[in-house]
Image (tube, grey):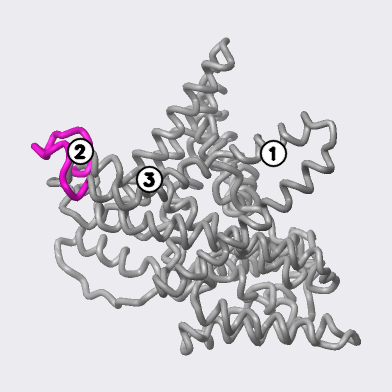
Amino acid sequence: MNITSVPFLFLFLPICLLFYYLIPNKKSLVLQNVFLLLVSLFFYAWGEPIRIFYLCILIVVNWLLGCFVDGKKGTKLGKWIVFIAVLINVGSLFVFKYLDFTLENIGFILGQELPLLGFTLPLGLSFFCFQAISYVVDIYRGKVKSTKNLLNASLYLSIFFKMTQGPIVQYNQFESQLISRKTTWTGFCDGFWRFAIGLAKKMLIASNIGYVVTDIFATDTASLPVVSAWLGCFAYMIQIFFDFAGYSDMAIGLGKMFGFEIPENFNYPYISTSVTGYWQRWHITLGAWFRDYMFYPLTLGPAIRMRKFLAKKKVNKNVAKFIQNLFVTGCIWFTTGIWHGATWNYVVWGLINGAFIIWELYKKPLKNKKLDSALGWLYTIAVAFFTKAIVCTPDMGSAFSYFGSMFGLNGNSLVSDTTLFYFREYWIFIVIGTLACFPIYTKIKEKLVNNSNNSKKVKTILYGIETVALLIVFIISIAYSFKNGYTAFIYQKF
């Protein structure tokens, strides 16, 4: 089920909220958890009724592994249990997402075409597996105790508003909310407005600009007009940001409506002055997961052994440190790339980002801080911009052809009637989307409040204006839900 669909907005969500808040106070949290688990499983089964059984098996297996690994930190048995947990979850992801990709590449090496199995990725499996791994590892590390309550573990792994696309919530961030949380009118209202903002980002900006992106990247890359090729990358930058940030806002808002606090996932990434900063602001929970469950284990394990080996070989310390950084960053960004998609384009995309992050570790800042920030912002935006052509094309040959069209190297025209049509029909969404990528309103609001003699009055007026504006935007977003019907989120395929 899609959280922007008419059935969700007018049937599933209102009924869930009604019955959730009607549950009696006595033992209400347990009953609320049972209710949320049942509706979450129904939510998942709506689109994939058969695979709900596989999901339930994974939930039970990870719960049992969490029970077995509790109190075994540092032991061989504990390490083996963690290894089994990672093997099961990553193995599931490999079979459904990467097996055909692997068979294609083996066939290419052998010079013969191998039969493909054609498995389709179950909805949200990438996010589920990462959260399942965090569940077992957090227990092994002693951050949390295992829950003997299968209900709580199941709800953490399958709660509907974060299951299919995140944010990726680590178990140590969520455990306390399973056993103690409060629902308040203020929290519900905050959640509703956050949900409305996310719905507007998806339905009004991402979905409309998505028509431009889909049309441009479906065209033969070699024949694209120059302006259309540049517009395609620019439009995709806006689309993917508002698509995924919109979903994250909706998930956070839904969480608040049910009494949960979900971590933030975006913080104006397009204002970043470095690629490192960009990824600290984009898909924040994914970055936190890689930091806690991949970066730290790599630096405390293989990287240390590598450093000792290089020391024995009397390799210069700075060179050894560079090799260590290259190894760790390369592993993380190769994994990040392949996690986003089972194609070599995503691997290249990941390694390009990793290369810039390595470069930034050694780059010396300019003495002029303003100039350094300005140049940093320009090259960061350039990296984000040009790599869009890589991930939006089916293979690297098409990506190079697309770059050729951007610079007129394919003998293509500068502009076409179709290009002008894009600007004429979608300019308002492109302009609003571009402006909303930056905290312009937030800065204006801060200045109005801070420079006013009566800040309370200004806050009240702004709150009234915001409320009316959000109501109007929410109604328009609902109208677009009826008009456009089902519009998938980009990160569903990841």
Marks 1 and 2, how far apart at CA: 39 Å
Amino acid type at mark 2? Val
**Residue indicated by mark 1:** 445
Closer to the N terminus: mark 3 or mark 1?
3
**Residue indicated by mark 3:** 349
Residue 303 covered by magenta stretch: no
**Horizontal side of residue 322 vs 150, given as left or right:** left
Is residue 160 visible to the viewer in this orientation of the structure? yes
**Which structural element holds mark 1?**
helix
Residue 208 position, x and y percent, is 39, 58
Is residue 75 visible to the viewer in this orientation of the structure? no
**Residue indicated by mark 2:** 226
Closer to the N terminus: mark 3 or mark 2?
2
**Residue 321 against residue 344 in the figure, above or below:** above
**Image quarter of residue 11:** bottom right
Q: Quick one: quadrant of the C terminus?
A: bottom left
**Residue 209 against residue 161 in the figure, above or below:** above
**Horizontal side of residue 138 vs 280, given as left or right:** right
Residue 356 position, x and y percent, is 45, 33
Amino acid type at mark 1? Lys
Magenta region: 401-419
User: Crowding at label 1, few (<14), some or many (≥20) Cα neighbours within 10 Å?
Assistant: some
x 53%, y 39%: residue: 278
**Image quarter of residue 227:** top left
x 43%, y 48%: residue: 238
Amino acid type at mark 3? Trp
